[in-house]
Image (cartoon, rainbow, N blue to C red):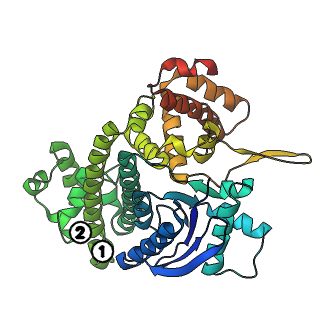
Amino acid sequence: MGPMIRVGVDVGCKTHQVGIAGPDGTLLEEFSIPHTQEGFTEFFTRIEHHRRKLGLPVAVAMEGYNGHARPLDRMIVEKGYRLYNVNNLKLARFREIFPGPAKTDSLDVRKILELFHLKDHLPMAKDVLQEVPEVPKENEKLKRLTRRRRQLVNEKVRVMKRMQADLQAVCPELLGLTRKVDNLWFLRFLASCDDLEELAQLATEEIREIPGIGVKYAGIIREWQKGAKFSAEVEYVGPMIVADARRVLELLEEIAVLEGAIEELCEESELARRLRSMPGFGTISAAELAGEIGTLNRFSSEASLALYLGMCPLDKQSGQLHGTRSPRQVNKRAKAAMMTAVAHHIWEVPESRAYYERKRAEGKRHNQAVRSLGRHLVRVIWSMIKQGRDYELGEVECLT
């Protein structure tokens, strides 16, 4: 990195502490800005003042890229400044090695600037500051949409568990009408009345009008109605069950809309398209991986990508102890998507299935065997994207 104006930003929820240093590391200015458009304007005005004065390019390092700093991080890239993300975990380790007298936002900014100045000379500083490359817009959108979908899915699971527990307490026979509490016809049946007890009084014609309920399910419901009983707490728990059923139906609609948008974006994203060409890598898993990875330009090697995806356990050896440990730099969302995709891949590709079974026979647990195969597939993914080609079955022949 040549001579540059270096800017450090300690990101907060409502305000951000900013420090500006010259190319020799000298602190030129330090100030705080609110997370508002006025604050962003002040941020760029002050930086531009020093840029015009010194005639040097600008590089900005900030904590929590794509987090509380949005949309400031996007504006920095659009302005043409180089943007670096501060690895909070490694920054904490740096503080332990070179402890300061206290911890404040101002001291954190100065520590970031100090690391910035040492970046070209100290390997640890280079690891703490990672330049943010340009990510395709479609992958940025996939990241936001898949994270939103995951939040809605988690909410749906929570609501359904709560509803199932309430049904078990109020009317277990009603719950026994279905094997799965998330069956659409059952949810619509629960949501068809404001009072849960009214379900026992519905006529056959009214039941048949509920979408998804035909002759078979109507007969099952009629049999239940003949001996329907509710516990005493149905008076106040019943409305909760109805509200939860309606909320689950709303969530299913929202999730379906998101999945339609994700499907369209996957066609636009080269990374998602390449991943979908791999057996077992469905639309959602490929979209989540493409969104979380963004671009391979972020990674120096396929080993770095494997570490990010959680497919590369680290050795842990001390004396007679030999084992592994999970790295803390893993993207948990990407790891979950990769584990799901690899598990499906095992069932669709015989060579991968044989490799998995061999690892199990060696004494590895299920997740260990899946990660072992995942480590090989990361090499395949890296090669596919770098060479601009789709998956070929011969990629896994070397496993057998």
Q: Which mark is residue 272?
A: none
What's the amino acid at mark 1? Val
Percent position of residue 303, x then y: 64, 39
Dot 2 lies on which element?
helix
Measuring 20% from the left and 72% from the top, which residue is drawn there? Answer: 195
Is residue 400 at all visible to an observer of this figure?
Answer: no
Front one among 329 and 120: 120
The CA distance from mark 1 to mark 2 is 8 Å
Measuring 63% from the left and 22% from the top, which residue is drawn there? Answer: 399
Mark 2 sits on what residue? 196
Front one among 85 and 273: 85
In the picture shown, does residue 126 fall above or below 26? above
What's the amino acid at mark 2? Leu
Percent position of residue 366, x then y: 63, 39
Which quadrant would the C terminus be assigned to in this image? top right
Front one among 54 and 176: 54
Percent position of residue 196, x then y: 23, 69
Measuring 73% from the left and 45% from the top, which residue is drawn there? Answer: 314
Tell me the crowding category of disc 2: few under 14, some 14 to 19, or many 20 or more residues within 10 angstroms, Cα based: many
Residue 54 horizontal side relative to residue 25, left or right: left
Mark 1 sits on what residue? 234
Dot 1 lies on which element?
helix
Percent position of residue 265, x then y: 31, 43
Tell me the crowding category of disc 1: few under 14, some 14 to 19, or many 20 or more residues within 10 angstroms, Cα based: some
In the picture shown, does residue 329 fall above or below 267? below
Would you say the residues marked 1 and 2 are in contact, meaning their CB atoms lie under 8 Å apart? yes
Which quadrant holds residue 198? bottom left
Q: Earlier in the sequence, mark 1 or mark 2?
A: 2
